[in-house]
Image (tube, rainbow, N blue to C red):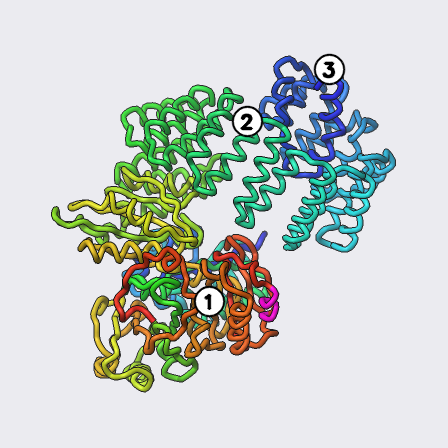
Amino acid sequence: MSVATVYLLGLGVSPRDHASVEVLQAAASCRKVLASGLNAQDRKFLAAFAPKGAVTEAPAPAAAVAALLAEARAGRPAALATPGHPFYFSALGGAVVAACEAAGVPWKSFGAVSPMGVGLSAVGATIGTTIHGLQSFEHAALAGKAVTPNPVWPLVVYFYEPVTAASFAAAAARLAGFYPPEHLVVWCSGSAGGRRTTVAALAKEGASAGPDAVLYLPAKAKSSAALGRTDAHRIEGKGPAAPAWITD
Amino acid sequence: MNDKELLATLDGGDEHRRVLLDRGPVAPADYEKALKTAKGALRGRLLSVLGRREEALPVLAAAAAKGEARAAVWLAAEHLHSGRLEEALLALAPRSGEPWAALLKAAALLALGRDARESLLAAARRGGEEGAAAAALEGLALAVSDPVAASARLRAAADAAAGRAWPLVLAARAARAAGDKAACLKALEEALEREPSAWVHIERSRVFEEIGDLDRALADCDGALSLDGESAELLARRAHIQICRRHYHLAEPDLGRAAALSPKDPQPRLTRATVRLIRGDLEGAVSDARAAGKVGGDEALLERCRFETYAGKLAGVEKTLSAVEKRRSDLKGAVAYERGALALKRRRWLDASGHFEKAAALGGPGGLSLKAGFHRAVSLGIGLTGARAEAPPPKDKARLLICGLGIVPPYTASLDALRMIAACDFVFNNLSEPEIGALIWLLSDEGEPTMFDVRGADARWTKTIFRRVKPGKTTGFVTRGHPHVCGGLAASLIAECRRQGVEWRVYPAVSSMDTLAFDALPGSAAFWGQQVLDWSTLYAPETTVDPRVPAVLYFNASVAAVGEADYLRFCDRLESFYGAEHEVFFYGRTFNERPDRVKLGALRRWHGRIDPSYTLLLPPRSA
């Protein structure tokens, strides 16, 4: 019996909007799809594509890895499905890949709509035209100083690690230490999608973010670079006038 | 070409290529002419070389049964090329002493994973090109287990067949399989110097196409045509490249001539129908598909049904489908697929899903199960999430929706994007792949192609698109990747929307910035964030890159104009974050190609050689 493939399926920031066709098609080929971090509605939606009874809540990481490998070894494709992308969403995706590699089980992942993509769409900023760099950090990594924001690029913050009042406050405090209080913050998606606030106000909002929430903060400082900004627009000399808050 | 010369090219002269190269050589126009009068084994062989395998097989089998010279070997070759390896061996059994028989036998045995030494030795003993081909075949068999020995055998074959191109083409393929694009192109260059011929040009055009260098791919098609003159195969090949370049107006005449040269082949007409569909010429597309349906049997009739569906000419489609279903039980899956397309066009999403599910279960030729599975996901996805779709705009408001179908369209299309296309009154399609044009026509009723790329001309396309932006209507623009990643046109369109008070929305998509790090660094522990930057931002001294998380760096049109001193400043800046020894992934014109893995310091030597469409993935420094 040949060993089947383990799929790592990322359904994007908002699964019923961002799931890609290839991800749904892969889910349809699996009799076991372990859902991690998906809410009940998204799990039900995914279940409509897969064979009856295939989609279940993922057990603890070690058991999830073992279940996926056992299914693949039995010659049946299996999948781990998460919001965002399994590699970014939690450590489980990496653990599945490591176990597959060690066991010689083939695995495959697909691209997924990321918080960066959601942020860009929400504010209408274009890499290479109206902005020239973008950084996207998980709130806990930002709070824990595992990453350092760049002042001349906009910042995207997302919430794939469990959000607690303390972790949200710590992330907000890190932002407050880096940006002025009146600095703009845009809630790009999730229940607060479209709302604008400030860094100072964010700290008072408390933990209201889940995996479908994305924050976008424009650049803190204007870039002084003059060279190399001759992108397609500027060569043509007819570039659009973007609002100041989305340019660097 | 007289009969003797024709036989010489059809027999041993071409067999090395037929056996060793999975794609046969381009058939010269002379073959088409010769076919008109050829009989018996010769006719079978010509049909085989011209790719008309279904017709070739019975002709060759009949000739072999009569004991005609060469018929058994040609029959074996046909079986071999069609993957019927045991049949190939059986056909060869009574003719093992004929030229090329030993080589064919060796190829079949190797493909079956059996010991081919005796046959290889027999072929080698015959010397000349047959002997060289045996050495090459041995080299190919060793390519995975012993690349050094494989290379030596291929070189020996090249030396033994002095003046011939084919051993170098094999060497090119081996280099390509090993990921050495430069060596591959060098070998093909040498092959063309040795033996300028259409089939080598076409071979190289395929390589250029794969690496995204479409201008050179086109030049090779022109080169092939200048050597061999017009043939249906060469014209169709050049049309294919023109389609990839989105120069549909140039593909059409080539396909028209290909159809005229090969009137019984439905394919050129069906391809032209697709081109006309992409261009929005629905009448022309249906006319071509109907003409193809007259010469191509039930399979072509089903294609005709689909084009009628795309064009909204739905009246007679079900009747035709029922008739085909009644006649051909082997096409039940294909009929279910066409019924799914029909339901999709009628916006009966869940009905469509049911038909596609049935088609996927029944299966059929051409990867039908996979295609049906794809369309099932599309129709079920839209059907289940239809409530999340955009409502039509008010009568006095125009609306522009912009979406990307992701890095591997249409497979990476999101449900947002599909719902968007279905909500549009008119769709501009910036993607050349025929299957995307087809999907868009199943979901919408009107549209036309655009040809915007990283080099710009946004103002021109903005003007074109805004001609269709009207009050009470929803207009769509569909592109590759994410519209806001190196997509100047999206920025230009938004600016114009703001200026004219048009409602707009951009949908996020699966972009290269989202996928490259996954592909290159699976399971990395450093995925607590990512960065994406335009190369020019590094000239700002305030810019910092955090080397603890992955970064994707895009170039743009300005990299082609930058002076060397300034270019080196860019290299200095990048190295200041990562160090010159840091290994990075360098992507060429297409993300379908494996990236080159190079030390960051190597970039210093690349001034003037970086295309604006190239991309660099910088893994975390600790990874």
* Magenta stretch in the rendered image: B600-605
**Dot 3 crowding, Cα within 10 Å, few <14, some 14–19, many 20+:** few
Q: Is residue B277 visible?
A: yes
Q: Residue at x 46, y 26 (%)?
A: B256
Q: Quadrant of the C terminus of chain B?
A: bottom right
Q: Residue at x 25, y 75 (%)?
A: A184
Q: Label 2, on which residue?
A: B232
Q: Amino acid at mark 2?
A: Ala
Q: Amino acid at mark 1?
A: Trp
Q: Position of residue B463 (x, y in %)?
A: 28, 47
Give the prevailing secondary structure in the magenta stretch: helix
Q: Secondary structure at mark 2?
A: helix
Classify B150 as above or below B51: below
Residue A55 is left or right of residue B351, and the answer is right
Query: Mark on residue B231?
Result: none
- Chain ID at mark 1: B
